[in-house]
Amino acid sequence: MLKVLLNNLRFHSHIGVYPEEKKIGQDLGIDISIETNIDYQTIHEDLTKTLSYGDVYRATAAVVTKSRVDLLETLAYDIITTLKTKFGAKIDHIQVTIRKFNTPIDGVLDNVAIEVRD
């Protein structure tokens, strides 16, 4: 089994429940963990036989930069759906963690996060 990990992808997004969040935006950190059915012993330096983390990043960036959803859960679902549609034959399981910084909470915290596994 081969696992592909992308850690702490950073984006400025315009998602959120409150109008200010969609207008001003906020920073997100995203982790993606993909368990594949790829036999790492058969790759032999052939990028077409593996799952390119560059392709995963670009597909994720396209979803995040265009999104205007309210909830992090919806964004995670949209990322998972996009990646499974694009790379589905190679994906066994996928997990997406999204951290939202500068949340409109009256308190001291680094971030809030959700995690979705499919």
Image: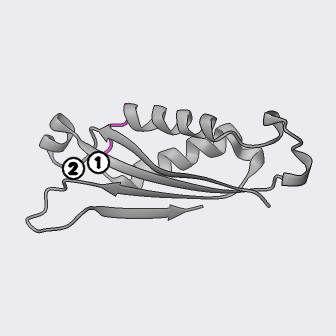
Q: Is residue 117 above or below residue 57?
A: below
Residue at 87 percent across and 44 percent down: it is: 43
Residue 90 within the magenta-colored segment of the rendering: no
Q: Which residue is mark 1?
A: 70
**Disc 2 residue type?**
Val
Q: Inspect this view and state whether residue 39 appears.
A: no
Percent position of residue 84, x then y: 64, 46
Question: In the image, which residues are magenta?
Answer: 66-70
Residue at 28 percent across and 45 percent down: it is: 27
Residue at 84 percent across and 35 percent down: it is: 46
Depth check, front residue: 15 or 101: 101
Q: Earlier in the sequence, mark 2 or mark 1?
A: 2
Q: Which residue is mark 2?
A: 17
Percent position of residue 10, x then y: 38, 44
Percent position of residue 90, x then y: 76, 48
Q: Is residue 112 above or below residue 38?
A: below
